Amino acid sequence: MKTILAIHTGGTISMSQNEKGEVVPNDDNPIADQQVILQGQINLITDEMFNLPSPHVTPAVMLAIKQRIMKAIDEGIDGVVITHGTDTLEETAYFLDLTLPNTIPVVVTGAMRSSNEIGSDGLYNFRNAILVAATDESYGKGVLVVMNDEIHTARYVTKTHTTNVATFRTPTFGPIGIVTQNKAKYFQELIRTEVADINRVVKGVFLIKAYAGMDGELFDAINQPTTNGLVIEGLGAGNLPPQTLPAIQRLLAKHIPIVLVSRCYNGVAQAIYDYEGGGIQLKKMGMILCQGLNGQKARIKLLVGLSDGKHGEKLAEFVRNAIS
Ligand code: ASP
């Protein structure tokens, strides 16, 4: 019988709705002792590590979860399930994907409806996540996100709807598997990329979204000695308004790494256009074009790379190498 560690961190999955219809945290997690659903099949160990709404989750919290999982791996656990608020779930999941050794299944899940709401999805997602974590085929696939009967990679999944239970999607590539008849079925393989076994997290890594008519004001505002890195969600295939360029150049002159992704929901940022502010010029200026990650994921990747002490070409290589 497999032993699965469930790490609870908070979020809607552990909350309830009160008489006024407001969703509020609980002192006691309503799903933490629900292991009865798999009694006799799986030995479930529970760690109520945090009770945080996920907007309260920081990279320091992510690092603590990573360290807890490393300890469990040393102790011989067969798989890990993490319950988490959905707002920043994709960031924690990707942080873990980038920093864990990929030796056992690690599955992150959450809920869109709290524990006592009609149609609550928490217990169902939790049960499915445990099943996936206990499945032999889940080994070597990186950190997985299981929600609403789908299995997504932490690398590409994103929250796409504020309230719908089908909120987690993988743009461009799709989910890598489904949960059906209480079994995980996979139909895609993920190409592995480098893992960084970090034990600290740097601060001062920012994310800014580009828009029509943007100028350099925001970029100058973050041009501070405490700034370590920046991700820009650029326009289209990876372009920026020309008025942003002088301020961006001032950041690059200070050797602050700048990563460019696209603000588009699908596709990748590439050096295609050769006009002022076009991707070709941005690449020549020294910006790192990151393919396939959204802004918040690219920020996590840059933060992990910097926290691992990478800089220059090594950092660029680590951040850029998202697809192959
Ligand atoms: N605001 C909640 C959170 O992220 C949403 C959820 O868990 O679904 O904690």
Image (spheres, rainbow, N blue to C red):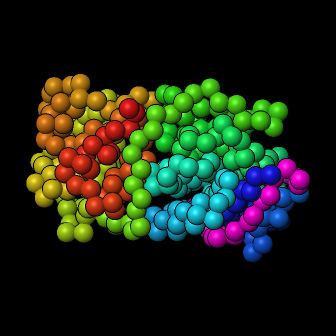
In the displayed structure image, the side of residue 106 where residue 264 appears, left or right: left
Residue farthest toward the bottom in the current orientation of the protein? 27
In the displayed structure image, the side of residue 110 where residue 127 appears, left or right: right
Give the quarter of the image for residue 159. Answer: top right
Q: Give the image location of residue 102, x and y in percent.
A: 53, 48
Residue 101 within the magenta-colored segment of the rendering: no
In the displayed structure image, the side of residue 317 where residue 61 appears, left or right: right
Q: Give the image location of residue 165, x and y in percent.
A: 70, 42
Of residue 293 and residue 15, the one placed in the foreground of this image is 293
Q: What span is in magenta?
A: 37-54
- Give above or below for 183 relative to 8: above
Give the quarter of the image for residue 316. Answer: top left
Viewport quadrant of the C terminus: top left
Of residue 210 and residue 320, the one placed in the foreground of this image is 320
Q: Give the image location of residue 155, x and y in percent.
A: 49, 42
In the displayed structure image, the side of residue 272 where residue 16 appears, left or right: right
Of residue 190 and residue 231, the one placed in the foreground of this image is 190
Name the residue at 50% across, 39% down.
156
Question: Residue 41: in sight, yes or no?
Answer: yes
Q: Give the image location of residue 322, x and y in percent.
A: 38, 38
Give the quarter of the image for residue 179. Answer: top right
- Give above or below for 83 relative to 203: above
- Give above or below for 47 relative to 209: below
Question: Residue 217: in sight, yes or no?
Answer: no
| Total numbered labels | 0
Name the residue at 50% across, 54% down.
100
Name the residue at 54% across, 44% down.
142
Name the residue at 33% across, 60% down.
308
